Structures are given as C-alpha cells and as structure tokens.
Image: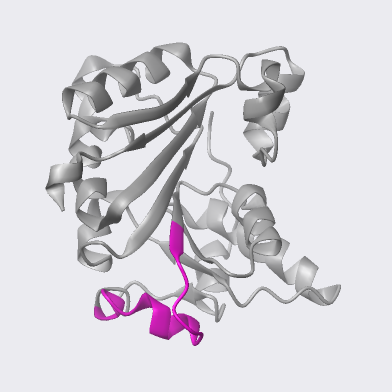
Amino acid sequence: MRLRNIPGAREEIAADRYVIPEDLQPALKGNWAGRFGTNPRPLYIEIGMGKGKFLTSLAQQNPDINYIGIEKYSSVLVRAVRLREALEAQGTVLDNLLYLRMDAEKLTDVFAPAEVGRIYLNFSDPWPKDRHAKRRLPGRTFLRRYRQILVPDGQLEFKTDNRALFDFALSEAEEEGWRIDLCTYDLHADPRLCAGNVMTEYEERFSAQGNPICKMVSRPPADEH
C-alpha cells in the first residue's frame, strides 16, 4: 500500500511533547521509567504502530503500564499524535504513552537489556521478496534484537492476516529457540483467545472482509538471561 505523504508531518511531530526527538532517544536507554515520571511500571512497546488505535486503546485500558509506540514514517506517526490530541481535548489523560520516530534496527541503541516487558508487532510489512527477508520484523534478524531488550520471560505478540508471513515468523521463532505460548490461524474464531483482543485499524478492515487473523505469542530462550 502506498504511503500518503502528509505535508508538515515531520514538523508537527517534532513540536509534540510526547514524541521523543531522535537525538535524545539514546540518552534515555535504561531510564525510560524516569522519562515517564512515575513509579516504575512495566514497559511495553509496539513496533510499527501505524495510526495508533491499538496502543492508544491499551494505554487507556492499562494505566499501570507504560507504552512506547515506534513508527518509522512521520506521515503515519502524526496520525497517532492527532488521535491522542483529540482524546486529550475530550479530557482523557494518557501519561503512560510516548512515541519514537525511528527505525526498528536501532532498538538496542535506545533500550537497555531487559528493559522491555512486551513487544507488539501488528500487521507488519511482509517484505515478500526473498532478498528482503532480513527486513521482516518477525524474522531472526529482529528476534535477536528483541531478545536483548526483553525482560526475562518477556513476550513478543505478533498478529497478521498474511499466512505466508505468519508461517515464516513461526519457523523463525522455532529456529531461534523461542517458546511458543500461543499460535492460532483464526483468532476471531476462538472466543477464548479473542477475549480482550484490541483490534488495529488493519485488523478491523481485514476481518470485516472475511480474512482470518493469525496470532502468535512467543518468548525468547530462557537461558538467554
């Protein structure tokens, strides 16, 4: 899908107090709890947060957890920022949600070992060509980065409607020794698994079209910590 450019998006997010400037991100490595200005709370991140519906909903539902949304493109991130602004205008306070505009390749530059409790990947770019496999967020190149920043027994949650990408992710996790806690090829068909499920914009669209949603929850090898 072609990304629609939003004029002024980069300037808009640069002026937003909840978007951490790129040059300040590495200095917060290991001290994100302090940046939230609260007592230590678990830190969960979403990589490729899109328009922000999923993470904003989680932040509203779980005030005892800190969330960081990571998005590479300004024209996408600005929509999440605007969503938050609209909620704040209605009186909703979200002191547990921040944003980073950055490439996921820099994760270990920004987060310390065992600093993140959970990582969400939702409807990631499938990068279908074989030569682009290293760019796939659920692939082994990124699994090794996730393993470094996750707390002991931390989780990676991955959802997609792309069966080929899901099978690839499952294979990569098993090859890397990750433990699979949950694996389903049709999330919405199982009332138990779907209980409490927060849908992204893509998930709402794809499931309305009759596309089954795949979900996997995994943990890195226990001996890595």
Observer able to see residue 70: no
188 horizontally vs 3: left or right: right
Q: Is residue 124 left or right of residue 178?
A: right
On the rendered image, what quadrant is the N terminus found in?
top right
Residue 5 in view here: yes
**Viewer-side residue, 2 vs 152:** 152
Residue at image point 26% right, 74% down: 29
Pinpoint residue 21: horizontal percent, then vertical percent. Answer: 39, 76
Figure quadrant of residue 113: bottom left
Q: Is 28 left or right of 222, judged from the image as shown? A: right
Name the colouring of the figure.
one colour
Residue 132 on image: x %, y %: 24, 25
Identity of the residue drawn at 69% across and 15% down: 189
Magenta residues, as a range?
27-44
Reply yes or no: does residue 186 show up in magenta. Answer: no
Q: Nearer the viewer, residue 102 or 183?
A: 183
Label count reads 0
Please provide percent x and percent y for residue 99. 49, 66
Q: Reply above or below: 196 against 45.
A: above
Q: Is residue 32 above or below residue 99?
A: below
Q: Residue furthest right?
A: 90
Q: Position of residue 103 (x, y in %)?
A: 32, 53
Q: Residue at x 59, y 54 (%)?
A: 55
At horizontal 17% and vertical 22% (from top left) the residue drawn is 175
